[in-house]
Every structure is written in structure tokens, then in C-alpha cells.
Image (cartoon, helix red, strand yellow):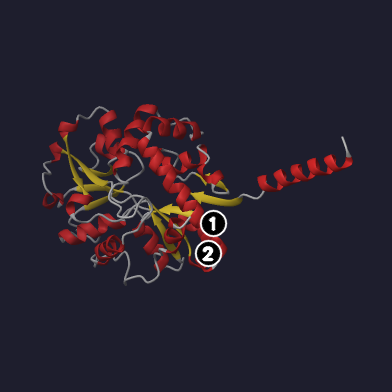
Amino acid sequence: MKALGKIALIAALVGCSTAASAADKLTLQLKWVTQAQFAGYYVAKDKGFYKDAGLDVTIKSGGPDINPSQVIAGGGADVVVDWLPSALATREKGVPLVNIGQIFQKSAMMLTCRKDSGITKPADFKGHTLGVWFSGNEYPFLSWMAKLGFSTSGANPDVTVLKQGFNVDPLLQKQAACISTMTYNEYWQVIEAGVPAGELTVFKYQDQGVATLEDGLYTLEKTLADPKAVEKLARFLKATAKGWDYAAAHQPEAVDIVLANDTTGAQTKEHQTTMMQEVAKLLDGSKKGTGYLDPAEFDRTVDILLSTKSAPVITKKPEGAYSAKVFDAAAKL
């Protein structure tokens, strides 16, 4: 080979190596364990949408001992998946989280009750034990109880709050009349445990007028002050939206991708298939496409949270808690 040819070949190889290493790294921290609730992110990575956007994305699964807000505050992630009530409460406590994209447009939260408890309407909650998730998930519940005029603490509360683990045992073992469930997960765990749907009564937060925004994408305020970081996040958001749109349109494939990423082997295809079907319903409703945060929905969530007088989730209307900067930049790509 001629010297000139060798130089050209070496240059080409170096160029390929540089291109291969040029992908921008980004770490995403999920709110919970690997499951179809997060299918869009896994699909975006598996199908190469992140790679095509020049990104090398690491997806970190969550769990009962992982608080996404603490992870990002400690530098362990660039973006986290969290619920707006939790993010706003965290922001008020000093961690400047900012919503840069809203994935779920509807709430999946419910209270699922045994019919033999005698509960047929929310007013019947009084005098009963209700299972509630904490670690930030209790905020919508507290707002709902405040709206009903029920106390949840003190010597003689109107409802007894059972700090619910991330399972459905309290309902199965009749330790609580109702428990917290998601339309895409725990409700179906109850069904799969052998309790017929006809023996259950469900109260969806969405139907009760107390629904708050759930899975959204958050980063730190300081990150948005860097134009290069905003551009990277815009590429991430656009690829993520593509991943979610693909997952909703190709649900069986999305389920297979989720299962392939479940290193614990704890998830079943049957349950994840049901979860994917239900999760896809939560994507509907955005005016501008996947990832858009409607300011009116943000304000509605804030109003609901501020209605909790006995145990306020937030004490004042937040400023700067969401930004359309990344979404708008993604729309131009």
C-alpha cells in the first residue's frame, strides 16, 4: 500500500474512533424498578434512538430505597423521572428541580377497596384504614383527604393511614379497607392474586378531581443555564418521545425490550403486557406531542397541592419549577 493510502486509512480509522467516542453521556434515573412504566426509555435505547441523537444514555433503575431527587442532587444523574408533587415538595426544600418534559398526561393513581368493607363512595372512607405509599407518593392522597375534610393524623383521625409497602398484602390480608394502586400495576396484582374485579371498588384520582401529574422528566436549574446542556437535553427529549411513541405503537416488542432489561428476572410477560396497555393510555391528551407540559395542568396540580391545609405539600405557588426551553429546542431539531 502506498504511503498516502496508509495515511488516508489511518485518518479514516481515527475519524471513526473519534466519532464513536463523541457521543454525549447522559444518565437517567428512573423512579422505580425496570418495568413497562418506563418502556419508552428502554425502547429509545434498544432501537438506537438515543445513539442516533448522539447520546450515550445510561438508564438506572429505581427501587424502594432510591429517591430520584437525592440521586440528582448528589450528582448521580443528569435527568430523573419523578412525580410533580414530589418534585415540587423537594424544590421547596432546597433542591431546584425543574420539569423539562411531561411524559404521562393522565394520572394512574387509585384507591382500590374491598366491596365487603362497605365503602361505596369517598365519604365512606371515614373510620376506615387506608393503605398509602410514602416517599413522595403520599402527597396526592393527603390533598384528597383534605378536600374531603378528613383528618389523617392526631389522636382521633377520621381515617387511619397505613404506611403501605410496595405490595398489595394489606388488602389481601384485610389489614386495610383500601390500598393505593396504579391502573397499570398494583390493581392487576390484586386481580392476579385471585380477587375478582367484581369484589373490588376503585376510586381513580382522575375521576375525583384530585389527580396530579405523575411521570415527568426533571433536571437541575443550573443545568438549564448552560446552552450546550440544553441542546443535549433537547436531543434526549426528542429521542425519548420517539421511544414512547414507538412503544405505544408496538406494545409486544416494547414488552420484550423491557423484559430483556430486567436483570432481576422478577417481571412476567403477562403482567408487563397488561402494564404496557395501561401505560399507553396515559400518554394521550398532550396538545403538542409526547413530552409537552401543559401550563394549565401544572397550575391545576399546584392548586390541588395547596389545598392541603392540615399537612401542606407545598406552602406557596412555585416559581421556575418547569421550563419549556428544552421542549421548544427539541421541536426545532
Looking at marks 1 and 2 on the same chain, the residue that comes earlier in the sequence is marked by 2
Mark 2, secondary structure of its residue: helix
Q: Residue 56, image x and y in percent?
A: 58, 47
- Determine if residue 23 is in view: yes
Q: Residue at x 44, y 31 (%)?
A: 266
Q: Amino acid at mark 1?
A: Lys
Q: Residue at x 14, y 52 (%)?
A: 126
Q: How many marks?
A: 2
Q: Residue at x 45, y 35 (%)?
A: 258
36 relative to 105 in the view: left or right: right
Indicate the quadrant where residue 275 lies: top left
Q: Label 2 belongs to which residue?
A: 223
Instruction: Judge whether 210 appears above or below 47 on screen.
Output: below
Q: Label 1 belongs to which residue?
A: 232
Mark 1, secondary structure of its residue: helix
Please name whichever residue, 244 or 257, is drawn nearer the observer in this view of the structure: 244
Q: Residue 249, image x and y in percent?
A: 36, 36
- Please give the label number shown on residue 330: none
53 relative to 161 in the view: left or right: right
Please name whichever residue, 6 or 222, is drawn nearer the observer in this view of the structure: 6
Instruction: Judge whether 94 appears above or below 55 on screen.
Output: below
Instruction: Judge whether 74 appears above or below 38 on screen.
Output: below
Q: Amino acid at mark 2?
A: Thr
What is the spatial separation of the Cα atoms under label 1 and label 2, in whole angstroms?
11 Å
Q: Which of the image's four quarters has the N terminus?
A: top right
Q: Residue at x 44, y 41 (%)?
A: 33
Q: Residues within 10 Å of mark 2 (few under 14, many from 20)?
A: some
Q: Are marks 1 and 2 in contact (CB under 8 Å)?
A: no
240 relative to 121 in the view: left or right: right
Please name whichever residue, 4 or 288, is drawn nearer the observer in this view of the structure: 4
Q: Indicate which label's residue lies in the foreground, 1 or 2.
A: 1
- Determine if residue 67 is in view: no
